[in-house]
Amino acid sequence: HPVVNDLYPKKNKIGRINLLCERHVFACAILIPKFQNFLFLLPNRINRVSLIFTNLFIELTDQTRQLVHLEGCHVVSRRAYRRIVFERRLMLISVLCCSLAVIFFVVAVGTISWAFVEVIQPNNASFVLQLGVWATWIRHFPRPPEDRPRLKDQDLPHYHRAQAALSSMAIGLMILSIYVAVCSLKYHRYMYKRLAAGVMFLSAMCILATIQILIYSIEEWSAYSDDHKSVDYVGATTYGVSTTLAYVAAVTFFVSSVIFLIGGRKHKGLMAATQEFEVEDRPVNLSKQDRPCMQVKRKVAVRLNTDTKTSMLTFPH
């Protein structure tokens, strides 16, 4: 705005104040109409966003209902169909609970509220030390500092590395198990459900192993402190919210593995719930001689050998 700069030079104090006032008025004159237009269009934008999310939720609900209730499948046994629908509902609930358990365990790994250890020094001064799984070890990566008396034990770094490695493996297995569980709901073959149950069981065992290694590390530190009274030694130990979240995640994945293992039964003949389940659960023979292409090749070879006894034909595998 060159007119304002010419009327009120910057050297004059009153001119500077008037210049600021003019600039504010000029800015308000430009911004207020734009803000009014934004407020006028805001309800329409909110309605559009809410409509998009509503349609997405309805579509997801329809797909979930079709997935659980097996819409479009040919029912063979009504009793088996009711049982399999109930099992698939339990599977869907377990998948949702496992998703929440992954969030719980990730939050637990990133915090230092696994255990609270009371440390008593030689001068009888005490303080509470908070321990974690990954958050405690990442501070001292790759080696703990030598000026920390409580980390002088040679075995404690191995415990910390094992905790960090097992917690990372547990998170990876948890995500993999959820993916396999969703695939087992989409594809009806029993092997997918058994595979999901196995991966969920491994995830639960990794979580429990992480908690147990943390407990063993505290016991190792306590034994080391008892042998070296010149350094600080461990008093009372209590376990925090992160350990509780880890136990909840482990129990959730263990129960889900049992549910998927029960749902991984074979469906044979007239006892199958639907015709699609019966077709998917038929045994598959992977031997080379029973393949259709090999049967055709054997027939052609036999026919050629009967026509010409001397000619031998070799076929690639």
Image: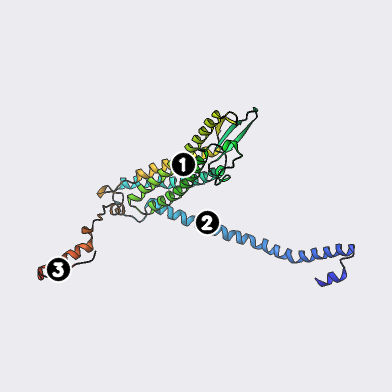
Where residue 276 sits in the image (x, y, percent)? Answer: 31, 54
Amino acid on which the number 2 mark rests in the picture:
Thr
Front tag of 1 and 2: 1
- Disc 1: which residue: 207
Left/right of residue 156 with respect to residue 74 in the rendered view: right
Marks 2/3: CA distance?
A: 69 Å
Q: Position of residue 45 (x, y in %)?
A: 61, 61
Drawn side of residue 132 relative to residue 264, left or right: right
Q: Which mark is residue 312?
A: 3
Q: Mark number for residue 265?
A: none
Look at label 3 and name its amino acid.
Met
- Residue under the point 46% across and 41% down: 207
Position of residue 167 in the picture relative to residue 9 (left or right): left
Instruction: Name the quadrant of the C terminus.
Output: bottom left
Residue 86 visible in this rendered orientation of the protein: no
- The image shows residue 156, relative to residue 74, as above or below, that is above
In the rendered structure, are the residues bearing label 2 and label 3 in contact, judged by CB atoms less than 8 Å apart?
no
Question: Helix, strand or loop at disc 3?
Answer: loop
Residue occupied by mark 2: 54
Q: Residue at x 80, y 70 (%)?
A: 1
Gap between marks 1 and 3, in whole Å? 61 Å
> In the rendered structure, which disc, 2 or 3, sits on the residue that comes first in sequence?
2
Instruction: Name the image quarter holding residue 309.
Output: bottom left
Q: Position of residue 297 (x, y in %)?
A: 19, 65
User: What is the secondary structure assignment of the residue under circle 1?
Assistant: helix
Foreground residue among 173 and 21: 173
Q: Residue 148: where, in percent of width, then height?
A: 60, 38
